[in-house]
Image (cartoon, helix red, strand yellow):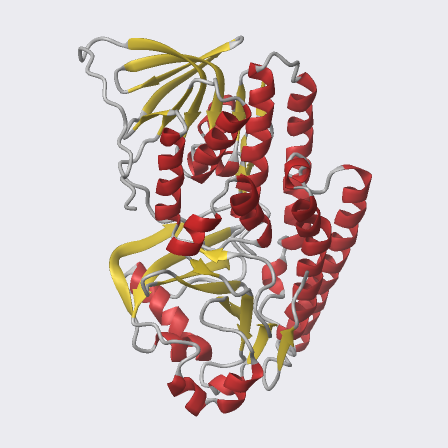
Amino acid sequence: MVRKRCVSETLSPSSSLQMELDYDVVIVGGAFSGSATALMLKRKHPAARVLIIEKSAEFDRKVGESTTELSSCYMTRLLGLTNYLGHHHLAKQGLRMWFANRPDQPFDDCVELGAKYQARLPTFQVDRSTLDQHMLDDTVAAGCKLRRPAKVSALELEGNRSYVTYDTYRVSTRWLVDASGRGALLARKLGHFHQNLEHPINAVWARFTGVKDWDSYEWREKFRDYANACRTSRNWATNHLMGHGWWCWIIPLRGGDVSAGIVYDSRIFKLPEGPSLSKRLRAHLLSHPVGAEIFGGAQVIEHDVHAFSAMPYWSAKVCDDGWITVGDAAGFIDPLYSPGLDFCSYTSYYAADLVARSLAGEDVSSGISYYNEQYPVTYRLWFETLYKDKYYYMGDAELMAAALLLDVGMYFIGLVIPVYKDPEREFLRLPFEGTPGRIVGAMMKFYNRRLVTLAKRRLTKGCYGRRNAGWRELYDGFV
């Protein structure tokens, strides 16, 4: 069965007339977070009159295209996308990290960290533009109205009604959901938007063709020990090239293209100059011995090169009576470990539940207070436990091996296992909640700070990356 892409309903008012319509919920932004909020809201409160306003005629590429065990649980268990993901995207086989000391280091002498066996829980390598479109189509099929392309020109918050002006229309709504992504319309308008100046990271990424196959017969003949060490496919993993102050992702996509990009801390690393972003990115990938093997014959797909600077930010207030922010409109930290869709999952589900209960006549004041109080705590602890100054030690294989085990282990124990046991309950509880969450956060902050201290000490003594050659550590997996 071929599924047709939805097209927004078209109205034709006079160019000088603003037609005013009324909705229960208006969602600004139709990508993952906006569509997920709409879908869950319609399931919890089918009578809700929902309008989605999407500025783009077609979705563009996003930073990172891997899902985690947590966001995959949300997509498969709650959104019901298992069949779609299985047919239209790739099954992901964990993550791998590659370390080296010098550009001419032999490939089979580089350090590898990663999984030995197949992933035990579903995760995916997704093309976000097609995933977002599929979900937006689902919202229209569920009864939501869509205006696309449509640019929001004004947002007015007045008591228990909000007003949104786009193109030649002005609509009123009981609830306004900001899913505008990095645009963060409400956070910027209301003065709640803050850059995370402690984490000055930037990213450049592109799509490539002609990237070599990690599991090819050619490589088996060339690197026999490498081929025999692993029981799963390296090609379907998210592979990472690691360095002091930077890391690169390598993500396969359905159809054969590969997404690759660099994220770097501007305090530590500068991307070498070059005639274009694509050439600068490709040159850097080739400077790592693993990258040189993988991308030696690869070419950048023209007009598919992107960049972000000053990536992390957060909102000091994320909701009030009548409005709420979700996904990247509320904040973003770092694409390492692919947490972006995790935040989208938590916030979209929480927003849908809160708005549905409000439309049903419940008093949701306590839910508004919880979201405003807990979101900044969650953001801050997620940043301090996993990312604060991590770029100082991520190029040292020995230090990063310790961090990887601790980070992933705590992620499974604290978040993944609970959401699989009861996703409807756990996605309403933001990470690092309550006293137990603070205790876990304090422990994780301690080991992260300790690893940063060790890295700086090694840099001073000239022994940073002292074990970046001659070994691999492959794990049985996590459950």
The image quarter containing residue 110 is bottom right
Farthest residue, direction front: 1
In which quadrant will I find the C terminus?
A: bottom right
The answer to whether one can see residue 447 in this image is yes
Residue 87 placement, left or right of 96: left
Q: Is residue 175 above or below residue 463?
A: above
Residue 400 placement, left or right of 201: right
Q: Is residue 393 above or below residue 9?
A: below
Give the residue displayed 66% in from the left and 45% down from the top.
Answer: 419
Residue 417 placement, left or right of 188: right
The image quarter containing residue 255 is bottom left
Give the residue displayed 29% in from the left and 34% down from the top.
Answer: 6
Residue 60 placement, left or right of 433: left
- Along the line of sight, which residue is nearer the eye, 7 or 44? 44
Give the residue displayed 64% in from the left and 27% down from the top.
Answer: 372
- Along the line of sight, which residue is nearer the eye, 474 or 241? 474
The answer to whether one can see residue 315 in this image is no
Residue 352's spot in the image, x, y percent?
Answer: 55, 28
